[in-house]
Structures are given as C-alpha cells and as structure tokens.
Amino acid sequence: MRTTKLIFTGVLALIIAPATQATAQAKTNVPDVVPGAKPVAVEHIKIHGTSLEGNLEGDAVDRDVIVFLPPSYNNDKKRRYPVVYALHGYSIGAEQWTHEIHVPQTIEGAFAQGAKEMIIVVPDSKTVYYGSMYSSSVTTGDFEKFIWDDVVAYIDAHYRTIPDRQSRGLVGHSMGGYGASRIGMKHPDVFGALYIMSPCCMSPMTGDGAGPSDQMKERALAGEKKVAAAKSPVDLAAQSPGFGSVQYATAAAWAPDPKNAPLYFDLPTKDGVPQPEILAKFTANAPLVFVDQYIDNLKQYRAIAMDVGDQDSLRFDATKLHTILDRYGIANIFEIYSGTHISAVAERFQNHVMPFFSTNLCFTKDCK
C-alpha cells in the first residue's frame, strides 16, 4: 500500500503543479533580430490524420500544420532539404507555440548566423483536453503515429525533402519534449537526431511517501465529480479550461476505456482513493520507466541533446534521463541553462536547436 500512496501523491501533484510550473506557456525572451537575415516562407496546411480516424473523443482528424521553408526553397527548384519536426507543449497548439519560439524570426536568425537551411514543420496536436501527450489511445487517436507516420509521409510527398531518417530531426518542448522522448525512443528508423527541451511527465513521480494530502484528495474528488456530471468531452473541458484539464488529458491518453462512455477514459482515483491498476497504466507511459527497453534504438541516433532551465522543476527528471544515457554509454549533450520553464525557449531554438540540427542532420542524399 505504501507504493500505491507514493504514486498517488505524484499523480495528483501532476494535476496541481503545471499551472504554477509553466503559467500556461507565457511570455518568452526574444533574441534580437539578426541584421541581413533573409525571410523564410510560411505555409499553413492541413494534414489528414489517418492514425486519428475513429477516435472516441471526437478530436479533429484533419490537423493544422505550419511549414517554414528556407530562403532558397522557392528559387532553387532542384534542391532538397532536411526536415525538423517541432512539437508544442500542453495547453497550446501549433500557432501559439510559433509565438513562444518566435518563428519565423528565430529560424531566419539561425540561418543568418550560419545554420544550414532546412525545413521546419510544426504540427498541431491539441485535443479537447488541450493536449494529446503524443500518445497512442483509442480515445484521443494515435497521435504518436500521426507524428512519425502521417505527418512525415505528407511532408515527404508534398515538399522537396531528403526522405531519409538521417535527414530528419525531432524536437519538442514540455509536453512536446515528452513527445520527442517517447517517439524518439521508438522510431530511430524515422528520425536521425533528437533534441529534447524541458520534457514533462518523464517519471511516475513517486512523491515523498507521505500519502495524498487533503488538498490533493479534494482536487481528485472534484475531478471525479466533474467527470460524473459531464455529458461529453467538450462539456467536461469547458468546466476545466487549460491546465484544469490536464488530469483528463493524461487519463484519455494513458488510461483509455472504450466501454466507459461518454468520456472513454478511467481516472486514477475512485472516491478519492488511488486505483492501482489505473496508476500502473500511467506509470507504464513514463519514459524513465520504459527507456531501458529502447537503449539499442537510442544508440542509432546521430546525436541527442537535451536542455532545461535552472529554475524549472523538470530539471530533476531531465537530469535522470541524461544520467541513464550516460550509464549506457549513449553520447548526449545536456545543459541546464539560466531560465524558467519557458523564458528562454525562443533563444534556445535560434541559438542551440537550429545549430544542433545544422551540425547533425544529413544535407545530401548520399550522406552517411
């Protein structure tokens, strides 16, 4: 019972903490405009998610995707380019994340400072509960496969890409960092370089052993009450906007239940009491729990990098992942920089993420 209490404490902390952790993905510091930077072209497209068809939540199957084409793309018609797929965090979609990482300015700035030209793709994975967790679920749809299969296949078919794993990069921040970790561990056959920014949800968050506090139990009971009264996912989400729905987003992603209409998920508590069989499903989706299964996959990457702010509580789990990679002899770049969860993401994207992929992706068809 002690173990159950530990996990229960952590799961409820996940429900309470994010609003104070990220302040709903708020303001970021923006690098200065780089003189002489050439403009990139921005295209807003829709990609049909075959992997999302039939999802029980009723989330959109045709998803918004933003594509940033490098300055030479429309002039050099024979040239092909590597592609970086960039995953947004919880409570926001692709459009809002482009404002946080301040693209296209930061992409243009990176190119002007010497980064090689590449295509950047930002797919939208926001759901009715404000986040898919980039997971595979009959309730939300298979957003994991949507990224590595549907989106990649569409971009290769409609743009002049170099359709090879060594010419594809994957990066994400917060929930997107979780997604980059999860998808990256499973699909080195699709991606060749991996950059993880301030990843959330990495461990089962086992707490301090004190068991659930009164505040946590009250929050759990309040969530159960809303679930019991909800007539549909839209109805439930309306009662708990933004980070108030994180407990439903994680339940829909990690504890789907096709027989539990109308919401089609199971909560990790019942009458405020932890449910071990449901908590086990949450734990099974923590990258720090399943990483050991994918070590051989991670060794296939050309390069792996991870960063996190020194004022971000997620730095502890990020450090744990870095330590595990080191223990297995997997080369990885790891940096704890000065900043909060979101304060430096635009600067990091321009001055660290873009140069990383410029160095570690293949820019020719016959690159080895």
Image (cartoon, rainbow, N blue to C red):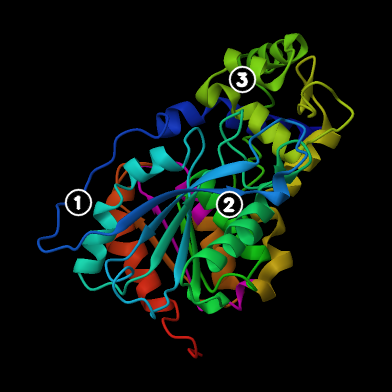
Q: Is residue 121 visible?
A: yes
Residue assigned mark 1: 31
Which residue, as the protein is rendered here, is positioned at the far right? Answer: 259
Residue at 34% across / 65% down in the picture? 354
Residue holding disc 3:
237
**Marks 3,1: beta carbons within 8 A:** no
Figure check: 111 above or below 40: below
| 87 vs 125: above or below | below
Q: Earlier in the sequence, mark 3 or mark 2?
A: 2
Residue at 61% across, 64% down = 153
Tell me residue 313's x, y (percent). Answer: 45, 41
Q: Quadrant of residue 61?
A: top right
Q: CA distance from mark 3 to mark 1?
A: 35 Å
Among numbered discs 1 and 2, the one appearing first in the sequence: 1
Q: Amino acid at mark 3?
A: Ala
Q: Secondary structure at mark 2?
A: helix
